[in-house]
Image: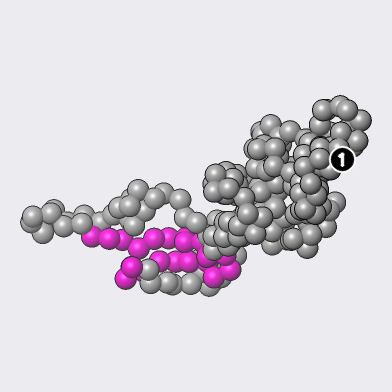
Amino acid sequence: MPGRGRCPDCGSTELVEDSHYSQSQLVCSDCGCVVTEGVLTTTFSDEGNLREVTYSRSTGENEQVSRSQQRGLRRVRDLCRVLQLPPTFEDTAVAYYQQAYRHSGIRAARLQKKEVLVGCCVLITCRQHNWPLTMGAICTLLYADLDVFSSIYMQIVKLLGLDVPSLCLAELVKTYCSSLECGGAIIAHCGLEFLGSSDLPT
């Protein structure tokens, strides 16, 4: 809407009035960011002491979560559940997504990059917990290009300053054998054959 400025999140000029909790707010129609808040009135015992406070101050929430970020957080949780990861993994992946989203370069990125970011946060979490999951498997689930995913993955690791170990291929072999319902002896044999009796991860 002309004359009302731009969205601080995505730069759009499509700002519209929106009534939230009966308070008028200016919201970006492209990404859902709340640009200006309405006011809530707090009354004391006498009307002479009326004062206005913004919604965020009244609740202690100073950060607005855009629709784009909300969608991304849902995707992180959904992906963790599809992969049947423990709840603690889901919490960690969500926290990484939120940290990454605070960076302006991520917030302004195209939808494709944000979708890949979802997978990167989940993969980083799995690697840190030595959970055997490959980048290729995540790309297949997200229909993402492997080269694009790899590039964004390295960017996020550097951006957040994370220590991420390499995937242990021995554990990956054991996981695939288990999914094929191989016996314990076969799984152990495959692991040893693959490693050449070395326990070094790659």
In the picture, the quarter occupied by the C terminus is: top right
Q: Position of residue 94 (x, y in %)?
A: 57, 49
Q: Closer to the camera, 170 or 26?
A: 170
Q: Residue 43: within the magenta?
A: no
Rendered residue at 70%/46% (across/down): 123
Picture quadrant where residue 159 is located: top right
Q: How crowded is the residue under tag 1: few (<14 C-alpha within 10 Å), some, or many (20+)?
A: some
Please tell me whether mark 1 sits on a helix, a strand or a loop. helix
x and y percentages locating residue 43 in the rendered image: 16, 57
Q: Residue at x 41, y 49 (%)?
A: 62
Q: Going 65% across and 59% down the picture, which residue do you hit? A: 82
Q: Residue furthest left?
A: 46
Q: Answer with the quarter of the image where residue 68 lies.
A: bottom right
Q: Is residue 111 above or below residue 154?
A: below
Residue with the mark numbered 1: 190
**Residue 153 can be seen, yes or no:** no
Magenta residue span: 21-41
Give the residue type at disc 1. Answer: Cys
Q: Nearer the viewer, residue 150 or 93?
A: 93
Q: Answer left or right for 166 relative to 82.
A: right
